[in-house]
Structures are given as structure tokens and as C-alpha cells.
Amino acid sequence: MPQLYSARRRKLRHTGKLLVMLAILLPMMLSVAGLVIDGGLLMSKRRDMQHGADAAATAAAFELLRGNGVAAATGVATEVLQIDNDLPDATVTVNIPPTEGAFAGRPNHVEVIAQTNYRSRLMGILDGLVDYPVQARAVAGVQDVTAGAAIIVLDPDPAPLQINSVAQTLAGIDLAALSTEAVGQSGLTPFLFSVPIVGPLASSLLNSQLTSVMPIEIGSLLDDALAGLPGLNAPAIIAGLEVEGVGTLVVDGSVIVNNQWGGVDENNEIVGDCAGPPYGVSCMPIVPTTSVVARDVRVAGGVDELHHYGPFGGGDGTPLQANRLPVEDPLEGLPTPSVSSDAANVSATVHNPGHLVRVTLPIDVASEVLGTVRNLLPALLRSLLDPLLDPLTELLTEATIQPGVYSSITVLAPLGGVHFQPGVYIVRGGSPITGTALTVIGPVQAEGVLFYVTASADYNATSGLPDAGQVSTEPPPNTIGSVLPSVLLLPLLPGADLTGLNDPSSPFHGMLLYQQRRDRRPIVVDLQQIVGGSRVSGTIYGKWAHLLLVGGGGSHDLRFVSGTARVVTVTNTMLAPSELFPPAQDVLLLE
């Protein structure tokens, strides 16, 4: 019995110790459990809040990038955090611009502060606190990610389009019809008919001579143009921007292409719609004879080969930014040229004849023609013609063209002699002879001019309608399978001077060529022989057009925006615009 009693007492004594130890350790155990459970849940809540704040700030900054304003950005930030991230009880504070941190006061930056409470499971039992405040902060902003742009190509997914080659266009010109029209518009006949006795006879003889000489001169000029043009017929079907020929396209600025077609990115990974072809940007296919050097090359899709693209100024690295967001048209807000938009530079005068044709002859050819006419006159009348030879030579070798409204403009000047007066030239339609709206071949003088080309035959130069009322945010459909170029600009020889409108107060300052936004007709500009004292400078804008730019040496103060583009290099070609388009921007999560 004593032994049994002693064992029972020891057991009761041990049980009492356990209860005491449990009473001592229970708060500590609950604290550890609270730290593990509530701490983990609190960290999870904090992480969710931070993700939500990051997403909200980023989404709000995208609203600013799209130009939707502060109110829209604030609303989107609240919606993204509370609804999309399932934090309906969170309090959202949106500051545009941020009020603190490294980006305080910066425009186009968003600060999002999110606050909520976490209700504890265990810790509240110990410390009496039921709700713990949870806060997250994020800053996102719109920032430049490229240099200013010299080339912007807008069409994200261009439809197939067969473009007649320049050779086809020039070879199809009716030389006799063009010559007849040029002689008829030269002013020779009314001038000579105003001179008694010798005038009518001299006019008849001169017209006869020009009928035989003019087609030969025009044909020779067109042959020279054809000899220098590359035999490239296809539109931009290999890439949104193609660089072909032999040599390097050097761009002192960035190249931005919205085309989404495939290729590789700066890490040589496949991006875009597919591996390609077609590509977003492409150099010479099959035989790698071309390359691009630029401050940045940004494309929504990909490029053909990474090594084709090098940084401006040399060095290591790549200028490529592939698989990026497209950019907006930097000239979307530009009005159509009209008296209402620029009364100082736009004339509503509708010229007659509407289809302007000017052909100037070289001085030696003009002298030979006039010498033949003089010799064909009766000897007694020759002395009456002699005082007229200088003004007749001037009419044959020179022409001055005034701004205003035309149905088409065709100028052929083998050695120059044609002067476009400064101002805006509105060309609505196309020539019944050439099929183009604007054809300029030869080293003309056109300083401070803007050519506005439209397919609207009823374009009103006073109001800008119907073009001013057209919606052009989406690419227009290709309703025809084959099209002629709208513009052939071929200066050919040194001495050309074509510069954009020169009026800083005008919305069209610096614009050289502006095509109706929904007009898909291709634009052809050949600069390959523009060296030595020649200038072709300004801005070329054809929002959904295809631009064929041929360059061969030299540096050009040119920039362009087009739907698709092909640049053909004959040796190296440099674009160094004195004024760049805005750089591409991205939304960056900064804090």
C-alpha cells in the first residue's frame, strides 16, 4: 500500500507540472502560431496590394499615353485595383503627377497609393489589435524610349497591292499627246499671234518644228530617268519597311515601324505573327547587300536578320527594339491645306488649264529650233523675227508656275528652267496622259512649296472638304488590284532645289509632300543623282500610301511618314532631318 500511494502521488505531481508548463507555454505557442498564420496571410495581403497598385499605376499611365486625360486615368486605376485585382475594400489614392518620390511633379506619371486592413486570425487575441493597416505604393510613367524619329511606317498589316513599276508608268506615256499639250500651254502661239505680219507664219512653222522635236526631247529625258531607276515592281510585300539595293541606309534618328509581321527581336528570338517572311522590317532578301544604321529601330513585329541593324555612330550593341507597341501617327492632327486652315499660304485659285503641262528645252535645242524657223521664213521677214528670238527662247527654256488648285501637274525639265513659286499646290486627281497626279522630272526650282495630292476631284481649297471630314484612323481597303503612282519626283541632275513650305506660323511649315490620308496611291521619290549643290528637304506624308525612296549617296534633310515603305540604296544613303518626329514612348513601372 505505501508503495502504491507513493506512485500515485508522483503521477499527480507530474500532471500538475504539465498543466503549469502548458499555462506558461500556451501564450508563446499562440504567438508563434499567430506569427506563422497571420504573418503569412499579412504578407500575402501586402503582396496582393502591391501587385494591384503596380497594375493600377501601369494601366493609368497607359491612359495618359493614349491621351485620355487625368480623369480617365484615375478611373481606370481605381477599377483595376478594386475590381480586376479583387480588392473591393481598398482605398485608392491616385496622384497625377506624383506627390513624393523621385518622380514627384513629373507630368505623364502616376502615383497610386492603396490602403486596406487585414483582420487577424490569432494575433488579436494576444495584443488586442484586430485590424492591421496594409499599404502599397506604385509609380508608373510615360517615358521616351527612342531618339526622335526620322522614319515612321504606320500600317500594321498591309494588304497585298500590286504597284505598277516606274518603268511601266514612264514607258506608257503618250509622247505625242504630251508634246502637243506642252506646246499648247507654252504661250508661244498667243505671243506670236500678237505680232503682225511675221507672227502667224512663225507660229505655224514653230509648232511644226516642235511637233517633231519635242517628243524626241521628252523621250530622251524619260530614257535618262528609266536608266537610273531600279527595276523593282513589287510593293512592300516582303516587309512593312524594306531596305533594298546595295549599301547602307543611315538614319540620324530612329526608325519606327508599326508592322506586326514576324522575324526576330534584339535577343534573336522569334516574335511577331510568324518567323517570317514577311517581316516587320527587312533588308535585301537572299543576298545580304543592304543594312540599316540608326539611333533606334523599333518595330511592332520582328526583323529578318539581327546583324543587318547597327547603331548610329558605331560601337557595340544593337539599336533594335522589336515586339513593341505601335505608335500613333505624329501628323494625325495636321489639317488639310485650305484657306480656312492657312490663308497666308493656300490659294483657292483654280487654274486653267487644270491639267498643267510644262516642258522646257535645253538652250541649244531651243536655239536650233528657232534657227530652223528663221531659215524657213522668207528672207524679208527674218529681220522681223529677230527681235522676238530672245523672248521666244525664254518661253521655250523657262517656265514659272503659281500656287493654287490643279487637276494634275506634269513638268519635264531636262536641264531645269522651271520655277515653282513658294506656296501650296493642291493637285486633285490625275493626268489623262501620264495617269499620275504630280510628275516632276528634272532639276526644277521649288523652294518653300507644299504639294498636296488628293484623289478627291471635288476637293474644295476654301474649306478642305471632303478630305477634312474623312476618318483615317484605320487603313482604307484596297479596292483595286493595281495602281499607278500618284507622284513621280525625279530631279535627276545637280541644281535641283525642292524644299518644304517655309513659314513657321503655318501648320504646314516644313511640309514638302502631303497626300490625302486615305489615298493609297504610291509615291516615288528618286534622289540617287542629287549631289553637288542640290537640295531636296522637308517632310513627306502619305499616311496609308506606299513610299518608294531611291537614294544614292549624300545626306538628305528628309523625314517621312507612310503606310509602307521601300528604300532603295545605291551606295550609302543618309537621312538627317533637321527636325525629328517625337520619339516612341512606353509605359514604365518606376517605383
Image (cartoon, rainbow, N blue to C red):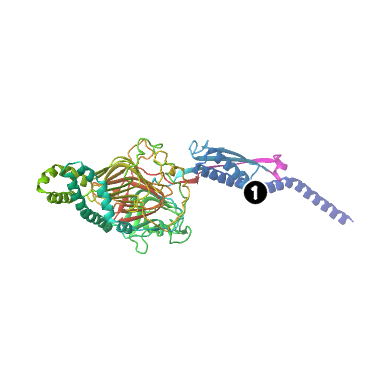
Outermost residue toward the left in this view: 379
- Image quarter (top left, top right, bottom left or bottom right) of the N terminus: bottom right
Q: How many marks?
A: 1
Q: Can residue 491 be seen in this view?
A: no
Q: How crowded is mark 1: few (under 14 residues within 10 Å), some or many (20 or more)?
A: few
Outermost residue toward the bottom in this view: 286
Q: Position of residue 315 (x, y in %)?
A: 35, 52
- Residue 571, quarter of the rendered image: bottom left
Residue 292 colored in magenta in the image: no
Side of 28 relative to 142 (left or right): right
- Residue 561, compared with residue 92, is above or below; it is below
Viewer-proximal residue among 170 and 72: 170
Viewer-proximal residue among 431 and 291: 431
Viewer-proximal residue among 327 and 183: 183
Residue drawn at the location 50% of the way across and 37% of the way down? 104
Outermost residue toward the right in this view: 1
Side of 227 relative to 258 (left or right): left
Viewer-proximal residue among 273 and 220: 220
Residue 128 colored in magenta in the image: yes
Side of 485 relative to 364 (left or right): right
Residue drawn at the location 26% of the way across and 58% of the way down? 227
Residue segment shown in magenta: 119-139
Q: Mark 1 points at which residue?
A: 40
- Residue 220, quarter of the rendered image: bottom left
Q: Which amino acid does label 1 sit on?
A: Gly
Q: Can residue 196 be seen in this view?
A: yes
